[in-house]
C-alpha cells in the first residue's frame, strides 16, 4: 500500500472516529461505568482500527467494529486481572456482561443511544468539575477532539489540557458520580451547567481576541454542533433550543463582523446582506421552539430573542428597539446583572432617546461590580455626545480610554474624546 | 466546514419515478441520524428536469431553455447542506447513505462551500462589537454567580 493510500485510510479512520466516538464512549460508559476506562478502551479500539483497516478496508459498520473490539479488549483486561486495580464498586457488574450472555454488539450500540449520549454529556459537564475542565472533557468525549486540538483551541499548552482531563476523570471516579440518567426536575437542574459549558466553548471561539483564528472558528462550530445534538436529545427543554437559537443567530453575523482591513464592525454598522440567512432561518426556528415550550422565557431564550430582533431587521433603522427593551427587562429580572442593565440602558436610549438612556446609565455609576468597567463611561460618553454635552462626553471618553488595556479600543475612545473637543471649540467659535 | 452534498439524477428520477416506500423510510432514518449528529443544516429533493428551466447566458444574450435536459448523470436530483469537520467526515456520512437510486448506477457528489476566506479572518479582532463584549461579560458574570451559588 502506498503512503498516499495509507494516508487516505488514516483520514478515513479519523472521520469514523469523529462520527462514532461519542456513541462508542457513551456505550462503553454504560457497560463499564467508568469514564476513564471507557475512553481508554475506545482509544485502544481506535488504534486497532488504524492498524487493521489499511489492510482490511473500512468495515461496513465501523461503529459496531469499534464496539466489538473495545469489548474484546475489556474482556482481555478482565482475564488478566488488570481491571482489579480499578477498585470500583461496579466492577462485578461490568464483568457480568463480558463472558456469557453478553448483549449483542448491535444491542449495545442501539440500545438507547440517546441515553448514552445524554449520560456522557451530563458526566462531562458535572457540576463537581470546574468550567474549564468541563469544557475540555466535553470536547474530548462528545466532540471527538484530541487533547492537542483542544489545547490549540484554548491557546494553552497541551500538558495543561491533558492534566485537566486526567484530573477531571479522577474527580469523577473518586466522587463515584451516579451513572443513571436523571429525569424530570433533577435533569432540568443539571442542564444549566451543560448549557453554560456549550456557550463558553462558543464564546471562546466567537469572541477570540488572539491566536490562530481558524481553530477558533472550529470552536464555534463544535459548540453549535453540541447544542444541536443536545436539542435532539432533549426536545422539550426550552432553554436548550434557546441556546441553539442564540448561537445560530450570533454565528449568522460572523462574516459581517470585520471590515476589509481587519477592523471590527459594530452591529449597527454591519452590512446585513452578508449575514448568513441559512443560520438566521435556523436560529429563528429554534427560537420559536423555545418560545413555544416555555413561559416565562429563560435567559438564553431571552438573549436569542434580542438577537432575533436584530436578525429580523433588514436595515438597522428597522430594529424594534422597544421590543428589545422589553426583552432586556426580562433579562434584568432574571440575571440581576448590572452589565445587563447597562445593555438595557443602551436599548432604552435607542428606543426612547439618549436622555432616557443616560438617566439609567447614571443610576449605574455607583454599582461596585461595574467599577473599572470601561464600557460604562464609554456608553455614557456616547449618550452625552448625542445630547451635545460635549465637555462631559469628552471626560467620559477619556475615562473609558484610561480603563481599557486594548490598544485599538483605547485609540478609538481617544479619537472620540478628540471629536468632542473639536465640537466644543467649534461651538465656542460660533457663539 | 460546510459542504453541499448532491444526489445525481438517474433515468428513473428523471422519469419522475417516485422512490419506494423502503427507500423513503431508509432515507428518513438517515436524515434523522444526520440531524441527531448536528450535521444537517438543510436538504431538499428536486423534481425532474422536465419541470425545470434554464437561462443560458451567451454573448450578452439571455435565452430561456425549457427542460428536460439531456445529460442525466450531471443533473442534480436532490441536495443536502451539511456542517462537518472535514471532507472525510462528509464522505463517511455519505457511505452511510442508503443507495439513492436502487437498481441503477448513480453518484453522490460532495463539494465544499466557500466560506473559510470570509470566515477565518473575522476571528482575530482586537476590538469587538460592543454588544458582543457585553454579552461575553454577561456570561462571565453568570459564571461567577453560578460558582458562588
Image (cartoon, rainbow, N blue to C red):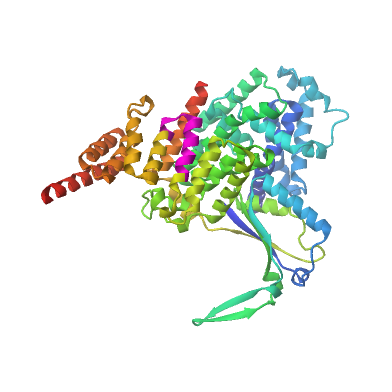
- Residue drawn at x 67%, y 26% is A186
Q: What is the x, y in percent for residue A129?
A: 57, 24
Q: Is residue A63 magenta?
A: no
In the rendered image of this protein, does residue B82 appear above or below residue B77? Answer: above
Can residue B87 be seen from the camera position used here?
A: yes
Residue A332 on the magenta span = yes
Nearer-the-camera pick, A6 or A338: A338
Direction right: furthest residue: A101
Please name the residue shown 64% across and 18% down the image: A175
Q: Main secondary structure of the magenta part?
A: helix
Q: Position of residue A202 (x, y in %)?
A: 52, 40
Rendering coords of residue B86 (x, y %): 60, 50
Horizontally, residue B132 falls left or right of residue A245, namely left
Image coordinates of residue A86 in percent, x first then y, are 71, 19
Asked which quadrant contains residue B138, the reply is: top left
Quarter holding residue A296: top right
Residue A221 visible? The answer is: no
Q: How many marks?
A: 0
What range is drawn magenta here?
A323-340
Picture quadrant where residue A237 is located = top right
Amino acid at each position: 500500500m502506498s503512503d498516499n493510500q495509507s494516508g487516505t485510510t488514516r483520514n478515513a479512520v479519523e472521520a469514523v472516529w469523529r462520527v462514532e466516538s461519542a456513541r462508542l464512549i457513551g456505550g462503553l460508559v454504560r457497560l463499564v461505568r467508568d469514564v476513564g476506562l471507557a475512553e481508554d478502551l475506545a482509544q485502544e479500539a481506535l488504534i486497532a482500527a488504524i492498524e487493521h483497516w489499511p489492510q482490511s478496508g473500512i468495515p461496513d459498520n465501523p461503529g459496531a467494529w469499534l464496539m466489538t473490539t473495545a469489548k474484546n479488549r475489556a474482556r482481555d483486561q478482565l482475564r488478566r486481572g488488570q481491571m482489579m486495580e480499578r477498585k470500583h464498586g461496579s466492577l462485578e457488574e461490568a464483568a457480568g456482561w463480558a463472558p456469557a450472555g453478553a448483549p449483542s454488539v448491535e444491542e449495545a450500540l442501539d440500545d438507547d443511544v440517546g441515553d448514552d449520549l445524554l449520560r456522557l454529556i451530563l458526566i462531562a459537564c458535572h457540576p463537581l468539575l470546574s468550567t474549564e475542565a468541563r469544557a475540555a472533557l466535553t470536547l474530548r468525549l462528545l466532540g471527538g477532539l484530541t487533547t492537542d486540538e483542544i489545547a490549540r483551541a484554548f491557546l494553552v499548552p497541551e500538558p495543561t489540557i491533558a492534566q485537566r482531563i486526567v484530573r477531571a476523570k479522577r474527580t469523577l471516579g473518586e466522587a463515584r458520580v451516579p451513572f443513571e440518567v436523571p429525569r424530570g426536575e433533577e435533569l432540568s437542574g443539571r442542564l444549566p451547567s451543560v448549557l453554560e459549558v456549550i456557550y463558553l466553548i462558543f464564546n471562546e471561539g466567537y469572541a477570540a481576541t488572539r491566536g490562530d483564528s481558524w481553530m477558533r472558528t472550529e470552536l464555534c462550530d463544535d459548540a453549535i454542533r453540541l447544542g444541536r445534538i443536545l436539542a435532539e436529545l432533549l426536545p422539550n427543554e426550552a432553554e436548550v433550543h434557546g441556546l441553539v437559537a442564540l448561537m445560530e443567530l450570533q454565528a449568522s453575523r460572523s462574516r459581517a463582523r470585520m471590515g476589509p482591513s481587519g477592523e471590527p464592525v459594530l452591529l449597527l454598522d454591519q452590512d446585513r446582506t452578508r449575514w448568513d440567512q441559512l443560520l438566521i432561518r435556523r436560529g429563528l426556528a429554534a427560537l420559536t421552539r423555545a418560545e413555544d415550550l416555555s413561559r416565562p422565557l429563560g435567559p438564553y431564550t431571552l438573549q436569542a430573542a434580542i438577537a432575533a430582533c436584530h436578525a429580523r431587521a433588514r436595515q438597522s433603522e428597522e430594529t424594534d428597539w422597544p421590543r428589545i427593551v422589553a426583552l432586556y427587562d426580562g433579562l434584568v429580572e432574571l440575571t440581576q446583572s448590572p452589565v445587563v442593565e447597562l445593555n438595557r440602558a443602551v436599548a432604552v436610549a435607542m428606543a426612547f432617546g439618549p436622555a432616557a438612556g443616560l438617566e439609567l446609565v447614571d443610576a449605574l455609576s455607583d454599582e461596585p461590580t461595574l467599577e473599572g468597567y470601561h464600557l460604562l463611561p464609554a456608553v455614557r460618553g456616547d449618550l452625552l455626545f448625542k445630547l451635545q454635552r460635549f465637555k462631559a462626553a469628552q471626560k467620559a471618553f477619556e475615562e473609558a480610554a484610561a480603563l481599557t488595556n486594548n490598544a485599538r479600543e483605547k485609540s478609538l475612545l481617544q479619537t472620540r474624546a478628540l471629536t468632542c473637543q473639536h465640537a466644543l471649540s467649534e461651538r465656542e467659535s460660533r457663539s | 466546514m460546510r459542504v453541499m452534498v448532491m444526489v445525481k439524477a438517474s433515468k428513473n428520477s428523471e422519469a419522475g419515478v417516485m422512490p419506494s416506500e423502503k427507500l423513503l423510510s431508509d432515507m428518513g432514518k438517515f436524515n434523522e441520524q444526520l440531524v441527531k449528529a448536528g450535521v444537517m443544516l438543510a436538504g431538499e429533493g428536486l423534481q425532474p428536469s422536465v419541470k425545470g428551466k434554464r437561462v443560458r447566458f451567451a454573448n450578452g444574450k439571455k435565452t430561456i431553455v425549457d427542460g428536460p435536459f439531456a445529460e442525466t448523470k450531471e443533473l442534480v436530483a436532490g441536495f443536502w447542506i451539511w456542517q462537518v469537520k472535514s471532507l472525510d467526515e462528509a464522505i463517511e456520512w455519505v457511505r452511510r447513505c442508503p443507495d439513492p437510486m436502487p437498481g441503477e448506477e448513480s453518484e453522490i457528489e460532495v463539494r465544499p462551500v466557500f466560506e473559510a476566506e470570509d470566515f477565518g479572518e473575522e476571528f482575530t479582532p482586537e476590538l469587538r462589537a460592543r454588544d458582543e463584549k457585553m454579552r461575553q461579560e454577561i456570561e462571565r458574570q453568570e459564571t461567577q454567580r453560578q460558582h458562588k451559588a
